[in-house]
Amino acid sequence: MWVNGHKFTTAKVALHRRGGWLLLCALLNGEPLPAAEPAGPTAAELKAAVVCQLTKFVEWPEPPSTNAPLVIGVVGESPLITALERLLQSAQNSFSGSLTIQKLVPSLSRSNAASCHLVVLGERLPERSMTSIIETLRGQGILTISDAQGFTRHGGMVGLGMEDQRVQIEVNLAACERARIRFSSRLLRQVKIVSPPAPKSP
């Protein structure tokens, strides 16, 4: 697999072609992934690789038609989005044909995101814009992902963070269930389940 021009050559990458589970576990557990050059992947590049691997363990209410790629919508700017764009634009990436990128505007409507299966929100988006997007996509069968702090606690579905050079995943199951999005049970054993605060009484 290639990340920002670096080719990961461990046995785990070969296993990725038979399902991807061990590679995802390696990314989550901080196991070394030697690159062709001395400089290893950045935190943003690791998160981008996790976003791509996650798609293998998600069931959408309306999956793409046969041979059609999953569409990843991206909103705003962030190191994660830049790394994701570079990964999927690389001619040698292992997701060619299965994933594609679509740029979205922060003021997106449901119709703007209708072709997307997941939407990645940049951590630099203003909180008001992020909240508005989460509300717009609520229950629409579109997986929302961000590495912005507190994302899942504000209604987002998947939050990404780093701890001890490991990618940490938080999942807001309630938000996923509203959108009829299901995760592999194996994946759920590897993540932190987040319960957002109950809405305030009027």
Image (tube, rainbow, N blue to C red):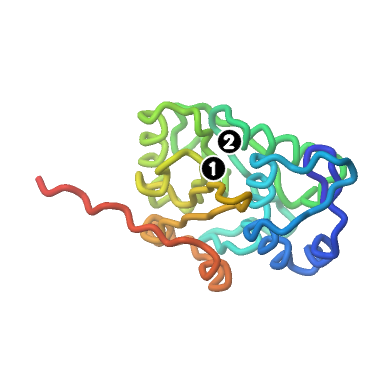
Q: Nearer the viewer, residue 99 or 7?
A: 7
Q: Which mark is residue 119?
A: 1
Question: Residue at coordinates 21% horizontally, 50% vertically from top-left?
Answer: 199
The picture quadrant where one finds residue 176 is bottom left
Instruction: Judge the density around disc 1: few (<14), some (14-19), many (≥20) Cα neighbours within 10 Å.
Output: many
Q: Is residue 23 above or below residue 201?
A: below
Instruction: Give the image location of residue 138, x and y in percent.
Output: 38, 47
The picture quadrant where one finds residue 103 is top right
**In the image, 57: left or right of 113?**
right
Instruction: Give the image location of residue 186, x and y in percent.
Output: 58, 72
Q: Amino acid at mark 2?
A: Val
Disc 2 marks which residue?
74
Evaluate if marks 2 and 1 touch, with contact meaning CB atoms under 8 Å apart: yes
Q: Nearer the viewer, residue 136 or 50?
A: 50
Residue farthest right in this picture = 36
Q: Nearer the viewer, residue 26 or 15?
A: 26
Instruction: Give the image location of residue 45, x and y in percent.
Output: 69, 42
The picture quadrant where one finds residue 91 is top right
Q: Secondary structure at mark 1?
A: strand
Instruction: Give the image location of residue 54, x and y in percent.
Output: 62, 57
Q: Is residue 13 above or below residue 162?
A: below
Q: Nearer the viewer, residue 167 or 90?
A: 167
Question: Residue at coordinates 41% horizontally, 49% vertically from top-left?
Answer: 152
Label 2 or label 1, whichever comes before in sequence order? 2
Question: Residue at coordinates 51% horizontally, 67% vertically from top-left?
Answer: 188
Residue farthest left in this picture = 202
Q: Amino acid at mark 1?
A: Val
Q: CA distance from mark 2 to mark 1?
A: 6 Å
